[in-house]
Image (cartoon, grey):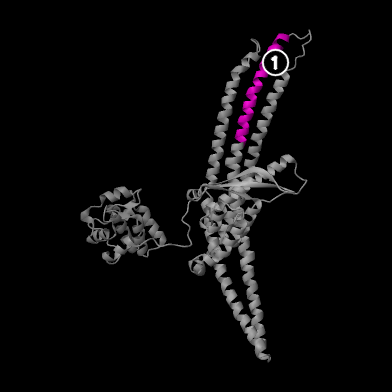
Amino acid sequence: MTVRVMAAEINEGSVPTYYREVYEAVCRQNDEKVQVEVFQRLLESTKLSKAVQAQIAEHVDAAADGFLSKLSLYKALALIAVAQQGKQPSPKVLENYIQELPKPQLGEPKDLRTLRMQPAQEDPLTLSLNLDRLLDRDAVKVELIPEKKGLFLKHVEYQITSLRYKMSVYRRYSDFDVFHEILLQRFAYRVVPSLPPKRMLKGVLTSVSEREFIEGRRRALGRFLNLVAQHPFFSEDELVKTFFTFSGSDVQIRLRDTYKRTGDEFMTNRNAALAKEYLPADVQVQFSASRELIKNVHNSVHKLRERAEKIAERSKGNASDLLMFGRELSTLSSDTSSLPSLASSQGTWERLCRSLKSLSVEFAVLSDKAAQQGRREEDDVVERLNLFLDLLQSYRDLCERHEKGMLHEHHRALLKYGVMKKQMMSASVQPKEQASVEQLQTRIVQQENAIQIMELRNYFSLFCLHQETQLIFTYLPITSHVLGAFVNSQVQGHREMGAVWNELQPKLGCLFGENNSLKL
């Protein structure tokens, strides 16, 4: 029996008065509907297990607009009553209640009115995000502007355009470097993406590969800024806004001043001091399991990126080969040498040369289509995989900072505190100057305070790590975006090249005589 059938069978005669009173207490006054959020609070007030609550919610027919009808609520109340009796809450069980539905234990109906007015309880640890909302936060473009030559060195400058702030600013690599350094100080407990290297060894690069290096760095800087601009905490910070909007020449000074005014996130986050209370009891177990899963995802995405790069390179190579193939046809057709008298196909060869020369144009078009295909694969597939890899690598870096930084400093502080306590015990046994003892006591108190702050920071680090793990999981559906982009690029590429090949095919007829026709 489906939910809809069961709901339709409930009639006013089988509904206890208590059901109507509960309905009147929790429904909206204007349209006589019950919000799903209110129903969820009602479920939570029953103190039934999460699993049983989920079973009941599964059997309740909620409309697409986020509301429950009167009959759906009655159905839910009956299932709650069944579950409170220790039975399995299923529509099948309700068939046994012929005369009147069972009464749930929810207290006085008038007291349930507060559920309607009560806002949903905020869980500071949980990020209510999806990938589309993250990507919609901002879209940042990084473009190279013409090189400026200094007294000794060439300087590459970038134009940064933020869709959110609707403006462009100009930045050099050193500006990125300072921004990254301060961002890491401000958000030490978050996933801060790495910057690409500033330069490679002088003399190693040829002029062509140097251009490729600069282009690769531009792309990497674009990924860095997009990950920062779309991060739920970075994107709302004054530091990030300054980088995207400040148009003065002293942006580095402005960034440092901004950080001095705010300090690191532990000093400004309202949940920092209470982080321990929000953490689940098994947070370390969850962290270990999530870290292993993300490590496996990282390895797989890295292999996907390698394959995607090879596919894009093959498309570029195909473009080069097609272009050279057409040029060789043109070279072949341009040979004006006459055939010797012993050649029986002199007239055919002359006609063939004229035709071959015209065909080289089609091969140039094919080459252009193949090159476009390679660029699509690089921009839409490889770049998205690179963005995800940058994020995954920054998560790995964050885990290492937590373990080797925060935990190590805390352990070292405890060891130092233990040494001080031993010195204090020794001073109490062996007489020492009063000033020396008081100084030691002061140092012990200072160390105790330092340890207390470190413990708070450690819990806040775990708190942030838990949120950043959620962020990584939010990005997982980007793999479907990548796959969709890959399929679309192949469909478009094959369609465009197929159209050129189909136009080329009839033109080959002039190359073949009656007895040597093209076999199709």
Residue 140's spot in the image, x, y percent? 55, 47
Quarter of the image with the C terminus in it: top right
**Mark 1 residue element:** helix
Q: Is residue 352 magenta?
A: yes
Is residue 50 depicted above or below 150 in this figure?
A: below
Q: Is residue 346 magenta?
A: yes
**Does residue 68 appear to the left or right of 376 in the view shown?**
left
Residue 251's spot in the image, x, y percent? 60, 55
Q: Residues within 10 Å of mark 1 (few under 14, many from 20)?
A: some
Is residue 2 depicted above or below 330 in this figure?
A: below
**Does residue 101 appear to the left or right of 507 in the view shown?**
left
Is residue 436 depicted above or below 360 in this figure?
A: below
* Nearer to me, 173 or 441: 173
Residue 53's spot in the image, x, y percent? 38, 59
Q: How many callouts does the rendering have? A: 1
Q: Tell which residue pokes out farthest to the left in this image.
A: 13
Residue lying at 62% horizontally and 31% vertically, measured from the top left: 370
Magenta residues (range): 345-374
Q: Callout 1, which amino acid?
A: Cys
**Does residue 117 appear to the left or right of 358 in the view shown?**
left
* Nearer to me, 181 or 113: 181
* Nearer to me, 94 or 35: 35
Magenta-highlighted stretch: main secondary structure? helix
Residue lying at 64% horizontally and 34% vertically, measured from the top left: 315
Q: Which residue is mark 1?
A: 353
* Residue 373 showing in the rendered view: yes
Q: Tell which residue pokes out farthest to the bottom in this image.
A: 431
Residue 111's spot in the image, x, y percent? 29, 66
Residue lying at 55% horizontally and 66% vertically, measured from the top left: 266
